[in-house]
Image (spheres, rainbow, N blue to C red):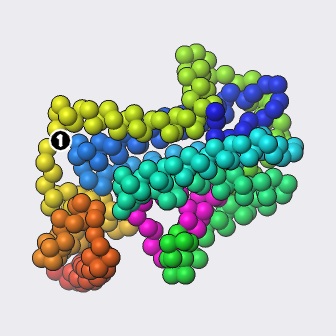
Amino acid sequence: MSLEQQTNSPRRITLIDALRGIALLAMASYHFTWDLEFFGYASAGLTAHGPWKLYARCIASSFLFLVGVSLVLAHGERIRWPGFWKRFAMVAVAAAAISLITFFATRPSFIFFGILHQIALASALGLLFLRLPALLTLVVAALVIAAPFYLRSPIFDHPALLWVGLSSADPRSNDYVPLFPWFGAVLIGIGMAKLAKTAGLFERLARVSLGQPFERPLTFIGRHSLAFYLIHQPVLIGCVWLFAQVWSAPAPDPKLGFTNACQASCQDRRDAAFCVRYCGCMLTAVEKDGLLAGIMKGDQPASARTRISDLASTCTVQTEDVMSPGDPQ
């Protein structure tokens, strides 16, 4: 059964099911790469930075956009409460199960507000926008997306408020999809779907076919998206685990792993030359303080995280001083 309820018109828009299926397959490809990284077959930090991070954001955005479109298709004329609450309960229970399982499996980075949590909350909040003008909905979407750039505050650092997405720094989690900015993607879907409906675009889309052999498997996945989401990662990680029993990944060099992850993260914000110097400084500092092993295990107490933050600030200042114009390189 799909995560979102579809229109009750006699002709289902299979293209939307197919697009959701494509998004789910893309999500599976990202998760498979994450699994390879987790077992040591890919470099540390590969999926958290650079092109893979952009890929993950595009996948999540497209999926949430389709949530908004589906809300309009299912409830644009009137809200069908029995169907809505049934699907809301299914997604909410699945989200709670994900949190519970990951809490015991990967406690330091468990999923407390991931994509399913966002879909459940956004589906409920999205109902408030179904009767608003499309352009107003799109304006609100822009404000929601921009909010983390302007409204971050330590007030939201309390664990009970991390789901909002306005904390001073993003918390550690294997899947973090907070209200701001991600609800904006759902609102864009709602706004664009209302414009498309007014223009009669959905009637034309209902006649679009991707053709065989692609349409049937993609629409099947799209119509059973919740089941696919819940099943695919245990299957993928199980396959990688079985492979690891036969062909173990080479033992990682912690220094190389730290440096690669540091440079990938740094290059999201600074140029390559700066990042090489900065990460060299950080490696020396964390080794001197005996923090390298804990960082690579992903298990640092609060005191260690505070110390790492202090070291990062120091290395940033030192690197900027060395790289400043007129200084020797």
Total residue callouts: 1
Check residue 125 for magenta coloring.
no
What kind of secondary structure does the magenta stretch mostly adopt? loop
Q: Residue at x 28, y 65 (%)?
A: 299
Secondary structure under badge 1? Answer: loop
Q: Is residue 117 above or below residue 288?
A: above
Left or right of residue 6, residue 183 in this image: left
Q: Badge 1 local density, few (<14 within 10 Å), some, or many (20+)?
A: some
Q: Nearer the viewer, residue 172 or 261?
A: 172
Farthest top residue?
212
- The answer to whether residue 233 is left or right of residue 63 is left
| Left or right of 303 in this view: 177 | right
Which residue position is annotated with label 1? 249
Q: Quadrant of the C terminus?
A: bottom left
- Residues shaded magenta: 163-185
Q: Amino acid at mark 1?
A: Ala
> Quick check: 278 above or below 191?
below
